[in-house]
Amino acid sequence: MTIDIIDLTDPDYADLSAVQLSMVRVAQGKKNEILAAAQREKDELRDQLIANNFARSSVMEYAEDRIDEEAQEQIAVVKEDLLYQLSYEALASEGNAQGPYRYPENPNYNLTPSQRFLVVRNYYMTVTDDPDARLQAYAMDSLAMSYLGEFYSTLYDLLASYC
């Protein structure tokens, strides 16, 4: 897979963590899907115009330009989301005197409540594949209750929905 969603040099890619590299690959896959869908739409349009004897009209040029613009707008959204995720992951990988921020060993209290929710959710989603064990472990986690505050019950409901 050619990665061209963001411009990074080889040393920059080497500095990415496995999670960040995975984020880049997912975003690249989304970009490739957007471009493939745009190409399919242009092909269908061309077939329709040929069937109606409009193949050489300016309608095709205008429609293809519109399709390309929409695809580029969608790609821009994916790229912006990727850059946000990469910066958030970099923030979450920083640490303090106790080491890197990791829930529950060293929770990051500088995060917003919604970011804390994501960190704890990601932690529990990677701890085990068994949804019942995941929910039971979360229910016994007293740190999560104080760390998440009002988001504790939201995450509990989310984890319970997997059971």
Image (cartoon, grey):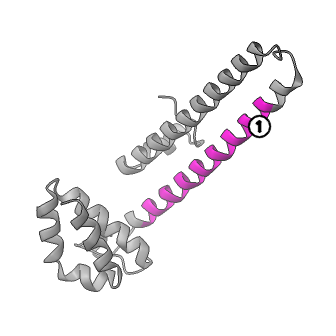
Say which of 35 and 87 sits in front: 35
Residue 103 can be seen, yes or no:
no
| Image point (25%, 63%), residue name | 161
Q: What residue type is labelled 1?
A: Arg
Tag 1: Cα neighbours inside 10 Å, few (<14), some, or many (≥20)? few
Up/down of 61 relative to 11, above or below: above
Secondary structure state at the residue bearing disc 1: helix
Q: Position of residue 61 (x, y in %)?
A: 83, 26
Region rendered in magenta: 63-91
Residue 12 colored magenta?
no
| Image point (42%, 74%), residue name | 114
Q: In which quarter of the image is the C terminus?
A: bottom left
Q: Quadrant of residue 146?
A: bottom left
- Find disc 1 in the rendering and name its residue: 66
- Residue 13 horizontal side relative to residue 42, left or right: left
Q: Where is residue 152 in the image (x, y as percent from the top left)?
A: 29, 79
Up/down of 119 relative to 30, above or below: below
Q: In which quarter of the image is residue 96?
A: bottom left
- Residue 8 horizontal side relative to residue 56, left or right: left
